[in-house]
Image (tube, rainbow, N blue to C red):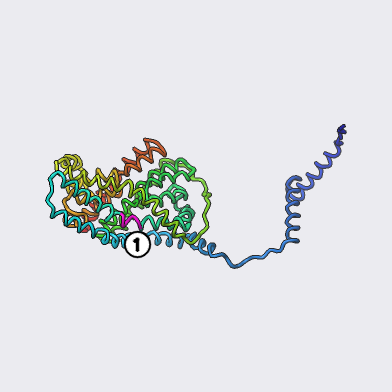
Amino acid sequence: MIKEKIEIPHSFFEEISKINQEIERVYGKDLKEFIFSERHHLSMKIAEEVTIVKHSIEKSLEERIDKILYHPFWGYIIFVSSFVLVLLLVFKIGGLLEDIFVFPFDILSAKFQSIKTYKFLKPLISGTLDGTMGAIGVIVPFMVPLLFFISLFEETGFLARSAFLFDSFMHKIGLHGKSIPPLILGFGCNVPAISATRIIESERDRIITALLIPFIPCSARTIVISALVSKYLGVWWALFIYLISIIITIIISLLASSFLKYPAPGLIMEIPSFKAPNIKNVLMKTWIQLKPFLYFAVPILVLGSIFIEYFKLYGAENIINSILRPITYILNLPPQVGFTLIFGFLRKELALLMLGQSLGVRITEITSVLSPLQILSFTLFTTLYVPCLATLLILKREFNSKIAIISLFLNIGTALLITTFIMWVLKGVGV
């Protein structure tokens, strides 16, 4: 095939230049922009001639619900109220279940007291009974409703919507709306919450969020708060501890953001459809989160309970209490409480379980040896101090050892400072 070369006369380009200049003079835009604009205009004109547009005034139920949930005022009220309602239900349901679950252990414990056995075997039997009673009778009743309601929030799509609702607020404290889902997941367990920070694109925001998560009261800490403060001091003091945790989280976020300045990116996130929860899925998610506790934590709780009985038998407990006496003195707690804080590093529930054993009473009789202010001091410090071992390990895996160490000392220092200050204030006002 022979291609014929076509020569374009120079006058053609001169004519195009004149037309371009005339269009720029009349319309204020060059020829290319004018052609694009006219093409779009003609397309819209043709579309209007051949299309019938009907505007539906009626909105779908999901759109109406989302309009309320995303409201700059009512959205926050609904979210906070839902969260407080869940905590109140957890305290109430957990308290009722605890009375039912503890009853069989009361009978077994009474029978054990009447049985004579070898001195060496007594700590084994007593520790097993107390450990099992603490895990199944005290901890599980509060853990199940908490995990259930968190799974319910996730299943309905309410959890994802919280990211958009709080996006503007999170920017004010130097973070991002995507930090909200991991922080909320932290109320269930800090470990998966730290893994969930992977959804955050900014490495700076991800690190700050991961350092904040250990200050969120996880289900283990909620159990300590429920079994001690809510039960003996009332729900308002329990909510007070949650409020303190949230305020500390905001303050630390502001401080960290002031040192690590970086403009937060815009929020682009897929929102799942709002749907009625599938109870089967909710129960399955609850079981998936509960199963590691039953299979992994319960044996640790029982073994820890047995160890503390033998430590008490041979006096090793006193050495640890002496080492930690400066901390327990600052917190206005009995020296025996120091031993329980060591176990709290493994699992927060262990601190609760060991508290009664260290003081020589059952956890259900703790008010006979601790004052209300001491109960509040112990619970607040346990809620804020060193993250559990699993949390530190996941921080090391997701980030590095440096971040894990920073988190460790940040929590210990903050817990000592805040607990001491609040106890000083409460004593000053005569609480």
Q: Is residue 141 magenta?
A: yes
Q: Quadrant of the C terminus?
A: bottom left
Disc 1 secondary structure class? helix
Q: Is residue 98 above or below residue 347?
A: below
Residue 127 seen anywhere in this rendered image of the structure? yes
Q: Is residue 142 magenta?
A: yes
Q: Name the residue rendered at 17%, 50% in the picture.
A: 359
Q: Is residue 45 left or right of residue 310?
A: right
Residue 273 on image: x %, y %: 52, 57
Q: Quadrant of the N terminus?
A: top right
**Hey, which quadrant is residue 364 in on the image?**
bottom left
Is residue 250 or residue 164 the one in the foreground? 164
Is residue 363 or residue 3 the one in the foreground? 363
Residue 329 seen anywhere in this rendered image of the structure? no
Q: Name the residue rendered at 26%, 49% in the picture.
A: 419
Q: Amino acid at mark 1?
A: Leu
**Hey, which quadrant is residue 395 in on the image?**
top left
Count of numbered marks: 1
Circle 1: is it few (<14), some (14-19), or many (20+) Cα within 10 Å? Answer: some
Q: Name the residue rendered at 41%, 41% in the picture.
A: 259
Residue 405 on image: x %, y %: 34, 37
Predominant secondary structure, magenta span: helix
What are the residue bounds of the magenta stretch?
140-144
Residue at the disc numbered 1: 89
* Residue furthest bottom in the image: 58
Residue 168 on image: x %, y %: 47, 53
Residue 95 on image: x %, y %: 28, 61
Is residue 22 or residue 102 the one in the foreground? 102
